[in-house]
Amino acid sequence: MTLVVIKLGNTVYNGDEEDEGYELLRFLNTIMYPHKDDFMDTVSEYIDFSDNEALHKEVIHVSTIEQIKYEGMREELREELREEGIQALILDNLEEEIPKERTLVKLEKYFNLTEEKAKQYYEKFTSGEQNIISV
């Protein structure tokens, strides 16, 4: 058995058909990033599933798991960025000496928070050493 390691880079391959190695790089990119919407269409150009239903089901299963994982990572990132925005608004309002009540109204309005959730965030980011935004 021989192990081959292939590094595609940090960006999705978007080469042209006339580029050298286009077919190979496109196939590798497809299987390395199975969360893309056109995954099954593209991989079907390279693999004939007509004689192997089990393989077809397995590929769909793997791509679905990857899609779920990818969507979960996007949701986590979105929530993290949202929380950093909340923190920035709170700290900026503190620096500008804007009253707590006004800051809470802004949190409710701009981040669609309940009054209770706005208060929780305010307390979280105004207590102790939390006043530094981590990047």
Image: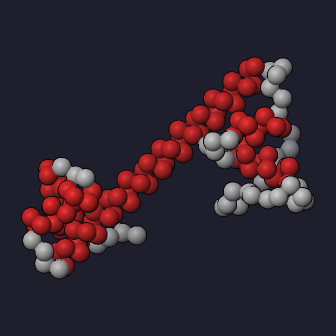
Q: Measured along the vertical axis of the image, is residue 108 above or below residue 59? A: below
**Residue found at x 19% / y 63%:** 106
**Residue 120: percent from left, percent from top:** 17, 54
- Quarter holding the C terminus is bottom left
Quarter of the image where one finds residue 15: bottom right
Colour basis:
secondary structure
**Residue found at x 12% / y 67%:** 102
Residue furthest front in the image: 109
Position of residue 119 in the picture relative to residue 88 (left or right):
left
- Quarter holding the N terminus is top right
Q: Nearer the viewer, residue 112 or 77?
A: 112
Residue 106, can we see it? yes
**Residue 69: percent from left, percent from top:** 53, 41
Q: How many marks?
A: 0
Quarter of the image where one finds residue 105: bottom left
**Residue found at x 90% / y 58%:** 18
Q: Measured along the vertical axis of the image, is residue 114 above or below residue 124? A: above
Q: Measured along the vertical axis of the image, is residue 115 above or below residue 123? A: above
Residue furthest bottom in the image: 96
Position of residue 106 in the picture relative to residue 16 (left or right):
left
Q: Measured along the vertical axis of the image, is residue 86 above or below residue 98? A: above
Quarter of the image where one finds residue 98: bottom left
**Residue found at x 71% / y 61%:** 9
